[in-house]
Amino acid sequence: MFNKLKAKLSGFKEKIGTRIDEKAVAIEPVEEPVEVADFLQTPSVSVSPVQTTVESEKSVHEKTPVSNETQNNKKIGFAQKAKALVFEREFILDDDDLEEPLWELEMALLESDIALTVSEAIVDSVRKQLVGTRRRIGSNTGNIVEDALKKAIYDVMSANVFDFDEYVKNAKKPVHIVFVGINGTGKTTSIAKLAKRFKDQGLSVVVAAGDTFRAGAIDQLAIHAGKIGVKIIKHQEQGDPAAVIYDAIQHAKANRVDVVLSDTAGRMHTNINLMEQLKKVCRVSPPDLLIFVDEAVAGNDAVERAAQFNGAVPIHGSILTKTDADAKGGAAISIAYITGKPILFLGMGQGYDDLRKFDPKWFVDQIFAE
């Protein structure tokens, strides 16, 4: 996954690495007197960088007695400095050095469906990390650039991250979780995956078939519930979703069920009737968590929809489905930053166990994995 984004970031790394190499200078050692014999005995050091100094100082040492301890100290000090000369360099970049590469980076991020404000934040972070600070190079200039990119992307993805499992564990029961989003993005499947996950953790679950609008939605959820082994509360199609979800909450309270997962009809935020219906659900049975579900492969469309839902009925977090098929990574990188609400889970396949709790560090590592 993220192959297109990986390729674009790799191009930026190479370009900045070349620029760093052009600007890098060797860290010059402070020259000290040293015996020719001592210098030649020092392993893995070339004579040529300091040959002139060694020869000019030789006559002084021939006339001045030097203790063994002093000789050893000189050998160690010179070896360290010679190693610095051969292996260590440092660089300092200015804005002019990065102007063109950073512009290309921003275009690459936008082409990867990363939202404009998020692209700007990443580019600004990389600029601040690389410009104007004297930096020492180890063995690979690419590592310096990659570390800057990793930090920049990690920072924008870490908006309000919280421990979902810990929240559910400590919340007053039953915990009511409502799922929203447009049609066809994987809400019902995500509900089934979470129900399986909660059951595996030893929690009792009931699902509420609150999507009474779409033909077949109730039957779809009922099939999932049967396979997982959890109870479903349902009414007839075209019934009142608020009534279905209210009944599910009452059942949970009466039977000491830990978690209620409520499906809702797919809708756009511009559908006034369905949005009013959703607001009624939230008034009648207030959710502890309102989760927005969309496809990672939808890119900027998913980010825009998340922002619109968050404005209409404030969400608490998001689930992104089809992440395993996402070549760009734009939605996952952007959505938490744009909404100010965390990504909670990533859908990684069609199986009930193919739901990964979101970890920004893991996600960033996947972007830069070979």
Image (tube, rainbow, N blue to C red):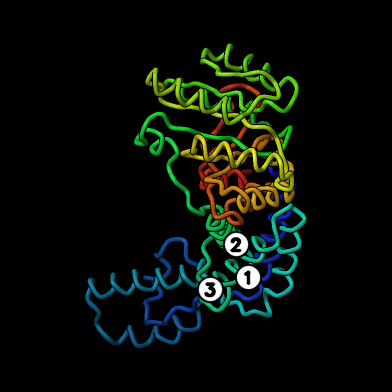
Instruction: Locate residue 12 relative to residue 193 in the image: left or right.
Output: right
First in sequence, mark 2 or 1: give its number.
Answer: 1
Pointer 3: what residue? 90
**In which quarter of the view is residue 322 placed?**
top right
The numbered dot on residue 116 is none
First in sequence, mark 3 or 2: give its number.
Answer: 3
Of labels 2 and 1, the one closer to you: 2
Pointer 1: what residue? 20
First in sequence, mark 3 or 1: give its number.
Answer: 1
Pointer 2: what residue? 145
* Residue drawn at 66 percent across, 28 percent down: 211
Per the image, label 3 sits on a secondary structure element best described as strand
Per the image, label 1 sits on a secondary structure element best described as helix
Front position in the image: 302 or 98: 302
Gap in angstroms between the C-alphas marked 3 and 2: 14 Å
Q: In this view, does 96 lie above or below 295?
A: below
Residue 326 showing in the rendered view: no
Label 3 neighbour load within 10 Å: few <14, some 14-19, many 20+: some
How many numbered marks have been drawn onto this rendered protein structure? Answer: 3
Gap in angstroms between the C-alphas marked 3 and 1: 9 Å
Which percent across, then down, holds residue 144? 56, 62
Residue 129 showing in the rendered view: yes
